[in-house]
Image (cartoon, grey):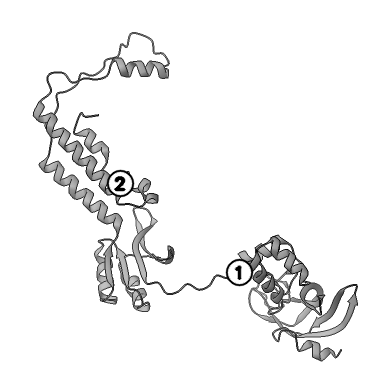
Amino acid sequence: MNASLLESFLPPDVKLSIDHVALEGNDIVVEADTRSGSVPCPRCRHRSTTLQSRYRQHLRDHPCRGRPLRLTLSAGKFICSNARCGQRIFCERLSGLAKLRACTSLDLAESHRSIGLALGGEAGERLAAALSVPTSPDTILRRVKTAPAAPPPPPRSVGIDDWACRKGQTYGTILVDLERRTVIDLHLSRDGEALKKWLAANPQVEVVTRDRWSAYIEAISAAEPQTQQVADRFHLIRNLRDAVEKLLRTTLQPSVMPATRPMRRNRTRPRRRRTRLHIRRLRTSYSPRPSGRVDPAGFESKWKLWSLMRTINDVLIGCLPREEKSEFEDRVIPYRFCRANSRIP
């Protein structure tokens, strides 16, 4: 077969010259050499023409008439002529044909990835063997995992909040795609200028969730006045909690209960190790009790306050999704506020 006809099937980015084509067993072996006169250095991109030596790279490619095809390529090792570059000797890259230190061509790796996406590892191995492109299940799964991700569509619903570069000192702005729950961009400031430029470059945004920071409000209103601005759920719940606590502290302040007698401890006896049984006996025998009579009116007000706080707390936590209840359970109305203002267990 004419060598020039075979060279026409090779990638145009790589200048190869086919020297020999042979049949070894069931495999077709094609030996070729590179014809590059000057090659750029992979570190400094300076082109070099000084050839140091040559090396061989063996690749597997698509089969020919059911026979596996092997490529034996002879590429060059060049010396970088840039004195300031730290790379003295580098190998010639076969861009468009294979990656560095690869054993398969780019086209064959893409075929393995397509088989893996359709069938998976074990079934993909059986189909690849039947198509004369044998490989292992691990290789097929590795091809699938290294597949380039499809570019995401432009975001329509964006969440804006601040994030701490250094907690308590330096804060920035984070933008999140609410539909896909992925981070879009990070800004190193929260003055709103970078946010304004980003919104101007993305006019497809329809909904923006934010907190009450004035710089965000001004930036969104100036960049996209038609965008709907929504206060996020966490800040709404926190503002409601603060308002309810302030109302209860000012209007429903309970009367002070009589002081309890502190439990005294005999210092003359030597200290001993307290076991769980001993601590349980102390709790049951020497539980603090209020001295004097309990005011019925004060007790009634405390009971109303406790019930109201419990109801508000349960309602706010019930509005959250199941996965966020544990996160917000300690941030909503705390029970210690109720315990600090009443003696009801």
Location of residue 41 in the rendering, given as x and y in whole percent from the top left corner: 68, 77
For badge 1, the amino acid type reads: Ala
Location of residue 256 in the rendering, given as x and y in whole percent from the top left corner: 13, 29
Q: Position of 242 compared to 256: left or right?
A: right
Q: In this view of the protein, can residue 86 be seen by the observer?
A: no
For badge 2, the amino acid type reads: Arg
Q: In this view of the protein, can residue 3 be seen by the observer?
A: yes
Location of residue 144 in the rendering, given as x and y in whole percent from the top left corner: 63, 66
Q: As rendered, which of 29 and 344 lies closer to the eye?
A: 344
Q: Up-down: is 266 above or below 167?
A: above
Sort mark 2 into few (<14), some (14-19) or many (20+) by Cα contacts within 10 Å. some
Q: Earlier in the sequence, mark 1 or mark 2?
A: 1
Q: What's the residue at 42%, 17% (across, down)? A: 275
Q: What's the residue at 37%, 78% (across, down)? A: 201
Sort mark 1 into few (<14), some (14-19) or many (20+) by Cα contacts within 10 Å. few
Q: What's the residue at 23%, 19% (across, down)? A: 262
Location of residue 153 in the rendering, given as x and y in whole percent from the top left corner: 45, 74
Tag 1 secondary structure:
loop
Q: Up-down: is 269 above or below 102?
A: above
Tag 2 secondary structure:
loop
Q: As rendered, which of 79 and 11 lies closer to the eye?
A: 11
Q: Which residue is mark 1?
A: 147
Image disc number at residue 331: 2
Q: As rendered, which of 83 and 22 lies closer to the eye?
A: 22
Q: Quadrant of residue 35?
A: bottom right
Image disc number at residue 127: none
Check the picture and name the quadrant holding the C terminus. Answer: top left
Q: Position of 159 compared to 88: left or right?
A: left
